Image (cartoon, helix red, strand yellow):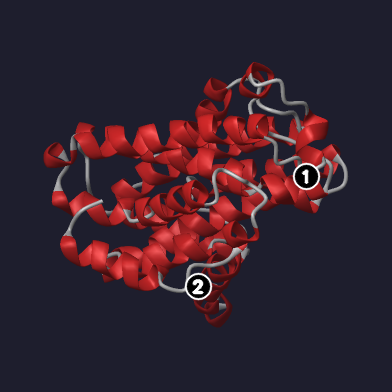
Amino acid sequence: MAASVQSSAWGPLRLGMKRDYEGYLCSLLLPAESRSSVFALRAFNVELAQVKDSVSEKTIGLMRIQFWKKTVEDIYCDKPPHQPVAIELWKAVKRHNLTKRWLMKIIDEREKNLDDKAYRNIKELENYAENTQSSLLYLTLEVLGIKDVHADHAASHIGKAQGIVTCLRATPYHGSRRKVFLPMDICMLHGVSQEDILRRNQDKNVRDVIYDIASQAHLHLKHARSFHKSVPVKAFPAFLQTVSLEDFLKKIRRVDFDIFHPSLQQKNTLLPLYLYIQSWRKIY
């Protein structure tokens, strides 16, 4: 039993490398004593994010979500199930006294998102990002031992930027499954229908929709950076994902906001180097 629990640490690591490559790279640059706990948090997030795409029926998805709700309850009662991610998450909770509310927010928001509906407006997308991506960052700050209102404020904006960018990046994939999740209010503003997106229409009005959504992500990054002088330097490693967010926003500008351009789906082979430089410069 001891051997299986010990080897369970590799589960979250492999899951992160495969399904959250950028998050995995960022986690490698965290202080050594924080790394395994953040791998566990990211693996937990990936497990929940995968539910929607890996089930054909909502009922099965709800059962998977229910498993994680019970798992979190059991973790806080010191009775984690013998599942690799759950065991590592339990260790992280014990080691850093993590706030249960943030874990439950991620689960609850992923559950609501099983409905498969487009976001009614950008605010709805931002709320989803706040409850998932920002909650993950609040937990990462706890792992780093940081309790600071300015760091939390930055985490809120960076999480929202991450959620918006993730929605944009996934648009071609969702379109291939005949689904569109882009905010409906912005689509309507530019006279763009779901069919335009599904047909990979590259007219100016479709690009305008993408421009408006990407601009909102850029704005959140700008806000997060506007008070970097007030954020403890110790918090900066938690915010390294701003490098990949910035990289995507620059790439999409270069292709004139054509969300279907093949270059947007390619991994940036220089990302590990950019992350290392950002980490060394102590900025976010």
Find the residue positioned furthest to the bottom: 3
Circle 1: residue type: Gly
Q: Label 1 to label 2, Cα distance in Å?
A: 35 Å
Q: Name the residue under label 1.
A: 175
Q: Which amino acid does label 2 sit on?
A: Ala
Question: x, y percentage for residue 223?
Answer: 29, 32
**Residue, far front:** 204
Residue 75 in the image: x percent, y percent? 51, 50
**Where in the figure is residue 266, as x and y percent of width and height?**
58, 65
Q: Residue 136 carries which label?
A: none
Circle 2 residue: 9
Task: Tell me the quarter of the picture where residue 147 sits.
Answer: top left
Q: Position of residue 11 (x, y in %)?
A: 57, 71
Q: Which of marks 1 and 2 is nearer the N terminus?
A: 2
**Side of 73 relative to 161 (left or right):** right
In terms of secondary structure, where does tag 2 sit? loop
Looking at this rendering, what residue extends furthest in the right direction? Answer: 57
Q: Quadrant of the N terminus?
A: bottom right
Label 2, residues with CA under 10 Å away: few <14, some 14-19, many ≥20: some
Q: How many marks?
A: 2
In which quadrant of the rendered view does residue 122 lie? Answer: top right
Count neighbours of disc 1 (C-alpha within 10 A) and say few if under 14, some if 14 to 19, many if 20 or more. some
Q: Is mark 1 on a helix, strand or loop?
A: helix
